[in-house]
Amino acid sequence: MNSIYLKNQIQPKVSVIVPIYKAEKYLERCLISLFSQTLDSVEYIFIDDCSPDRSVEILHSVLISFPKRKPYVKIIQHQINCGVSKSRQDGLNIASGEYVIHCDPDDWVEYTMYEEMYNHATHNNSDIVICDYILEQNNKSTYIPQRPQTLSSNELLVQLAKGEIYGSLWNKLVRREKIINHNIEFIPGLNVCEDLFFFLQLLKHCVKISYIARQLYHYDFYTNPNSIQRKSLSNHIIQDERIIELSYAILGDYPDARDALICGALFHLFQIQNCTNTEFKHKYIKYKKIILSNNTLHRHYKYFLLGAINGNFTLSRKLFFFLKKIKMTING
């Protein structure tokens, strides 16, 4: 790993970590929103994960228009492609800001985002600040409020696992000292839900959380065909099964959160795998009690999944996708 730093003398208020891979079509929009921030002291850390396109060239080109930001830019260049978890961790390792936050290169932020979140954090002496976001999909912008039911870290942990609060780190400002003190790290090799599991580990400790009801982040859903969500089927299966293992390892003392994540991963495996009835039952019948007792899944999804693990995988899956197609047709 090679690093390029431009050192500054004063500790930044916020460090923004941005992993880069095949982002040349979207990166300029992201960079302009980052470098145009109203907060005066922001450290920008970019991790070039061996991107084969012009992403890094675009980064340097845009930076020319923001000379005042240049002393606060750090660039890490991987020698081999390492994946998003390693990229985020490498960025975190060299961050020096009082607070840290992440940004994905195909998304963008409001110009006041980091100033608003930092001021909210310092005013309330918060370890974590959560904001709302805007889902950008098919040329449509949808405001997604987070509205935590509680600001208790243990209870919020369950909300995150159930999907009631979105698990990404890009709308969560975190006091870096808390990450260091509790030795929180990204899980090597996990490239799906890596940010969720990072945050879940943090919430297991006593942290002060606050919420700002402002839509400050623009999440561009599925625009980038190189997004991890569109990687190979075999990779999806490996990652989902890893999520099940990690749910047991990390959330053993939080059964509601653990079982919610397991059910979510199992239902995704039900949708993407091409198994025989016997194969699916053999692999996942051991989770039947968890599925029966957990109410996270929509009850119809629960029935489909139970049918599959009871030996009717093919029929359950055909029926699920048939009904899904009808619903899409009705909704236009």
Image: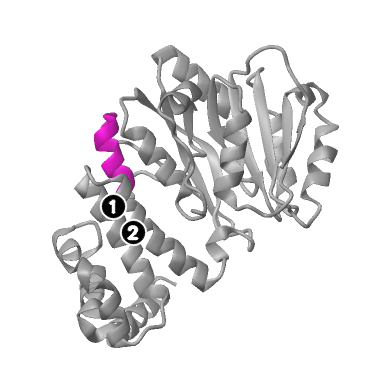
Residue denoted by label 1: 248
The reply to whether the magenta stretch includes residue 158 is yes
Residue 298 quadrant: bottom left
Q: Is residue 260 visible?
A: yes
Task: Tell me which residue sits at (63%, 63%) in the image.
Answer: 225
Residue 137 quadrant: bottom right
Which sits in the foreground, 13 or 88? 88
Q: Give SS at disc 2.
A: helix
Residue denoted by label 2: 244
Residue 64, image x, y percentages: 85, 32
Identify the image quadrant of the C terminus.
Answer: bottom left
Task: Tell me which residue sits at (31%, 49%) in the image.
Answer: 249
Q: Is residue 162 visible?
A: no
Task: Tell me which residue sits at (71%, 12%) in the image.
Answer: 9
Q: Which residues are magenta?
A: 149-161
Residue 202, image x, y percentages: 38, 34
Q: Give SS at disc 1.
A: helix
Q: Is residue 21 left or right of residue 146?
A: right
